[in-house]
Image (spheres, grey):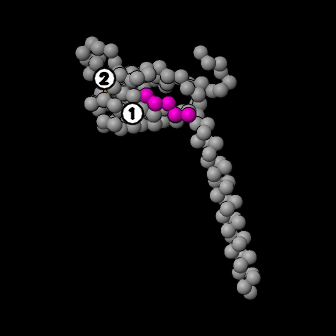
Amino acid sequence: MKDYKQSRSFKRQRLIRVFVTLLLGWGVPQLASAETHEINMKDRRFSTETMRIKVGETVKWVNDDTELHQVISGRTLSDKDLGQPMNSGVMLWNAAYAYTFTKSGAYPYMCVIHRALDEHQGARSMVGEIIVTDGAESPR
Ligand SMILES: [Cu+2]
């Protein structure tokens, strides 16, 4: 009876060990291959206005400014799909917003607050674009 119990607990321990190994095995390569690019928001500008990345990579925007900013998909304020797929909401100072791009294509975006303000004042708008290519395409 005692032997039976011991072997069961041993089997359970071994199962847990196998499970943990599998989890680590899946998790580590995913973290290693998915790159994150950072764009900073400062002086009403995106630090990189046009960024080229690959499918599966992540862009993280960080508000390093003393003003509120946003990351909102769209080329103009009247775009039908404004805010699709990226919509950070209002980003306070030091706030970060990240988006992982799973499909290739061009993703224009803007800070709606400053796009509207800058256009009203005749200044350059706070806009940016992420260009996502799949691995097969040659880098331009
Ligand atoms: Cu802004």
Q: Nearer the viewer, residue 123 or 119?
A: 123
Q: Decide whether the magenta segment is chiefly helix, strand or loop.
A: strand
Q: Residue at x 44, y 22 (%)?
A: 48
Q: Give the magenta-colored segment's residue range.
A: 35-39
Q: Residue at x 60, y 24 (%)?
A: 133
Q: Position of residue 116 (x, y in %)?
A: 29, 22
100 magenta-colored: no
Residue 60 sits in quarter = top left
Which label was assigned to residue 44?
none
Res. 79 visible in picture: no
Q: Tell me which amino acid carries mark 2.
A: Asp
Mark 1 → mark 2, Cα distance in angstroms: 13 Å
Q: Residue at x 40, y 23 (%)?
A: 47
Residue 7 sits in quarter = bottom right
Secondary structure at badge 1 equals: strand
Number of callouts in the render?
2
Q: Is residue 93 left or right of residue 32?
A: left
Q: Quadrant of the N terminus?
A: bottom right
Mark 1 lies within 8 Å of ligand 1 (Cβ measured) = no
Secondary structure at badge 2 equals: loop
- For label 2, count other residues whose C-alpha is less than 10 Å away and answer few (under 14), some (14-19) or many (20+): few
